[in-house]
Image (spheres, rainbow, N blue to C red):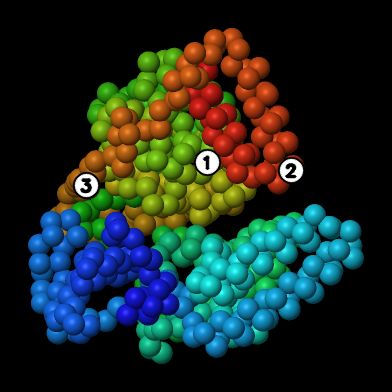
């Protein structure tokens, strides 16, 4: 039985966790990979006497079982014959690739590839598993070069329904996944970290994805042309049961837009609301946030350089009233549900492009639609095609809701949404190392330049782990400035 557990990629350990087992006398304890429970098998005279299941935390027995099924601890568990065949194919590809690299003068890459692959083959031969085993999935699953990988979609029945939320964002992401994955893998292959067959450990291409899904419902406030073209029926859900109306729009000139935003923000804050402002660049967002802070308005900026956990904390603080204004670039669009926000300001709304496209503008305007007094200020000196389309669509939706409210005597009510606890408390945040605090402030810029130089040098030498450590040190040092 122990041999079979090892074959299923379970690891023997004194401390139980998912995918591990331990043997104490004639008692075998297994923690299955997919459950938070422990199976205890008691033996007597070489035979199973009793099987039970207990809680790993409290030790409380949950049930006595007549039998138990233990599934593999990892996805890649194959019969010995399949593994033997795969190892032979991997070895053949390795020799061919090494000859190619040596022929074009990449001796270092060839040596690296041989060493790494032979180590993987040794682990596969002895244990049936190695780190990065998914990169050999072409051989382990018996696929030909270029064939699509197996996914969860292959296990669904033929008549299943696919629902794609925020399809105007989700579908482009699905389209881009394969190209992004391929670009990263090509770099690893060129530098001798992986065999070319690693390219077949990949996400589905868009055409492959579309071929695997049948019935599809696309959900979006701003559907793209693909969804419109492929849909046999379009259903609009504009009416809100709460009676909330799309925000009132105000078109204003860009000249003096910052001063005007400041004035409107002060009025909104005096009424107990919150404010979102969208700028075109990260630098503009940071500078405007600093300017508002100087004017005694609690403000923070939000863009792609802000860590994910910090973004969550900023938005939580906005809802709690710890922050009055958030200035962002492209993160104040889809998926933000902030009922406290009653004013959204779009700076330079006439700068046609991705950030000021029809879709982006409608999504940004929608951030003020959760408040009964929601308003949107659009600063523009000319009305672009995207701006006109966004204004017309918002006014159309607004009129439909207003007419519905009048007909049914509904008074709009704001959304009441519970406030979640922060994912990470200030005490849990990564502290700045104590020895960094001993560095004189005036010496930090020079030390930063030195660390950045070392990081770039490590990256050039392909010492990525050292480069990552230096990157983290640089982040910690910048906190002290």
252 or 102: which is nearer to us?
102
Q: Are marks 1 and 2 in contact (CB under 8 Å)?
A: no
Does any portion of residue 231 appear in the rendered image? no
Seen in the image, is 168 located left or right of residue 43? Answer: right
In 3D space, how far apart are the residues under numbered discs 1 and 3 (Cα atoms)?
26 Å
The earlier-in-sequence mark between 1 and 3 is 1
Q: Are marks 3 and 2 in contact (CB under 8 Å)?
A: no
Q: Name the disc covering residue 461, or none.
A: 2
Does any portion of residue 158 appear in the rendered image? yes
In 3D space, how far apart are the residues under numbered discs 1 and 2 (Cα atoms)?
28 Å
What residue appears at the point 60 percent right and 44 percent down from the top-left corner? 465
What residue appears at the point 50 percent right and 72 percent down from the top-left corner? 127
The earlier-in-sequence mark between 3 and 2 is 3
Q: Residues within 10 Å of mark 2 (few under 14, many from 20)?
A: few
Q: Secondary structure under badge 2?
A: loop
What residue appears at the point 46 percent right and 60 percent down from the top-left corner? 222
Foreground mark, 1 or 3, reads 1
Q: Secondary structure under badge 3?
A: loop
Q: Are marks 1 and 3 in contact (CB under 8 Å)?
A: no
Q: Residues within 10 Å of mark 1 (few under 14, many from 20)?
A: few
Judging by the rendered image, the residue that carries numbered circle 1 is: 304
Judging by the rendered image, the residue that carries numbered circle 3 is: 417
Foreground mark, 3 or 2, reads 2
Residue 9 figure quarter: bottom left
What residue appears at the point 57 percent right and 29 percent down from the top-left corner? 474
Against 154, is 417 above or below? above
- Where residue 294 sits in the image (x, y, percent)? 44, 15
């Amino acid at each position: 039985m122990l041999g079979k557990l090892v074959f299923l990629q379970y690891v023997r350990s004194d401390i139980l966790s998912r995918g591990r087992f331990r043997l104490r006398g004639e008692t075998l304890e297994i923690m299955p990979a997919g459950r938070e429970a422990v199976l205890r098998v008691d033996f007597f005279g070489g035979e199973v006497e009793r099987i039970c299941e207990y809680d790993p935390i409290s030790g409380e027995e949950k049930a006595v079982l007549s039998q138990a099924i233990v599934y593999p601890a990892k996805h890649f568990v194959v019969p010995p014959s399949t593994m033997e065949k795969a190892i032979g194919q991997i070895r053949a590809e390795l020799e061919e690739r090494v000859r190619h690299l040596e022929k074009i003068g990449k001796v270092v890459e060839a040596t690296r590839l041989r060493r790494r692959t032979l180590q993987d083959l040794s682990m596969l031969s002895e244990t049936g598993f190695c780190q990065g085993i998914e990169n050999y999935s072409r051989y382990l699953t018996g696929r030909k070069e270029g064939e699509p990988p197996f996914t969860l979609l292959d296990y669904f029945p033929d008549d299943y329904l696919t629902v794609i939320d925020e399809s105007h964002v989700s579908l482009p992401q699905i389209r881009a996944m394969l190209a992004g994955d391929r670009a990263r893998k090509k770099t690893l292959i060129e530098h001798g970290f992986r065999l070319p067959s690693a390219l077949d450990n990949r996400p589905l291409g868009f055409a492959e994805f579309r071929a695997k899904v049948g019935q599809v419902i696309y959900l979006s406030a701003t559907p793209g042309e693909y969804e419109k073209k492929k849909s046999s029926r379009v259903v609009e859900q504009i009416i809100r049961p709460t009676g909330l109306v799309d925000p009132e729009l105000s078109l204003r000139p860009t000249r003096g837009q910052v001063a005007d935003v400041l004035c409107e923000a002060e009025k909104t804050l005096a009424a107990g609301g919150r404010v979102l402002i969208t700028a075109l660049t990260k630098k503009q967002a940071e500078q405007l946030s600093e300017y508002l802070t100087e004017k005694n308005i609690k403000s923070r900026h939000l863009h792609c350089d802000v860590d994910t956990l910090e973004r969550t904390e900023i938005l939580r603080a906005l809802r709690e009233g710890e922050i009055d204004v958030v200035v962002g670039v492209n993160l104040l669009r889809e998926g933000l549900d902030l009922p406290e926000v009653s004013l959204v300001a779009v700076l330079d709304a006439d700068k046609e492009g991705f950030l000021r496209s029809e879709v982006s503008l409608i999504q940004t305007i929608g951030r003020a639609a959760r408040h009964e007094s929601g308003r949107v200020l659009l600063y523009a000196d000319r009305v672009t095609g995207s701006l006109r389309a966004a204004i017309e669509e918002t006014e159309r939706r607004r009129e439909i809701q207003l007419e519905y409210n009048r007909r049914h005597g509904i008074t709009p009510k704001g959304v009441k949404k519970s406030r979640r606890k922060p994912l990470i408390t200030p005490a849990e945040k990564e502290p700045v190392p104590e020895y960094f605090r001993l560095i004189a402030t005036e010496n930090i810029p020079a030390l930063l330049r030195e660390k950045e130089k070392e990081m770039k040098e490590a990256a050039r030498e392909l010492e990525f782990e050292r480069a990552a450590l230096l990157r983290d040190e640089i982040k910690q040092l910048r906190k002290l400035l």
